[in-house]
Image (tube, rainbow, N blue to C red):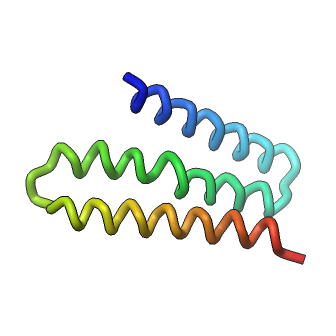
Amino acid sequence: MLFGLALVLSVVVTYHFVRGYRRTGRRPMLLLAVGLFLLAAAPMFVRLVLGNVDVTTVDVRRLTVAALELCGLLTVLYVVFDP
């Protein structure tokens, strides 16, 4: 139940960032949307999909989720510290 709520909320927040980008056309807003998606929503989708498939191992799922979260953090940090 809480996992589903967190997934929906992360998609809603990402959607609002995309709407902000479409309204302003500013690149940092788009990068924040991408970073937030990679940090929150994408790892949840990966856990949901790969958790229900027996083809992958737990280590592959963990590595995939960690890589997505790292990419999301790096994207957000790029936006924050871009001069």
- Pick out the residue farthest to the bottom: 83
Q: Which residue is drawn at the image coordinates 10% and 58% (left, top)?
A: 55
Q: Which residue is drawn at the image coordinates 67% and 52% (left, top)?
A: 33
Q: Is residue 56 left or right of residue 9?
A: left
Q: Position of residue 5 (x, y in %)?
A: 47, 26
Q: Position of residue 3 (x, y in %)?
A: 40, 32
Q: Is residue 69 left or right of residue 74?
A: left
Above or below residue 20? Residue 1 is above
Q: Is residue 11 left or right of residue 59?
A: right
The quarter in which the N terminus is drawn is top left
Above or below residue 71? Residue 25 is above
Residue sitting nearer the eye, 14 or 81: 81
Q: Position of residue 73 (x, y in %)?
A: 61, 65
Query: Which picture quadrant has residue 66?
Result: bottom left
- Pick out the residue farthest to the top: 1
The quarter in which the C terminus is drawn is bottom right
Count numbered badges in the picture. 0
Query: Which picture quadrant has residue 9?
Result: top right
Q: Which residue is drawn at the image coordinates 78% and 55% (left, top)?
A: 29
Q: Which residue is drawn at the image coordinates 27% and 60% (left, top)?
A: 61
- Pick out the residue farthest to the left: 54
Above or below residue 7? Residue 51 is below
Q: Is residue 10 left or right of residue 80?
A: left
Q: Position of residue 77 (x, y in %)?
A: 71, 68
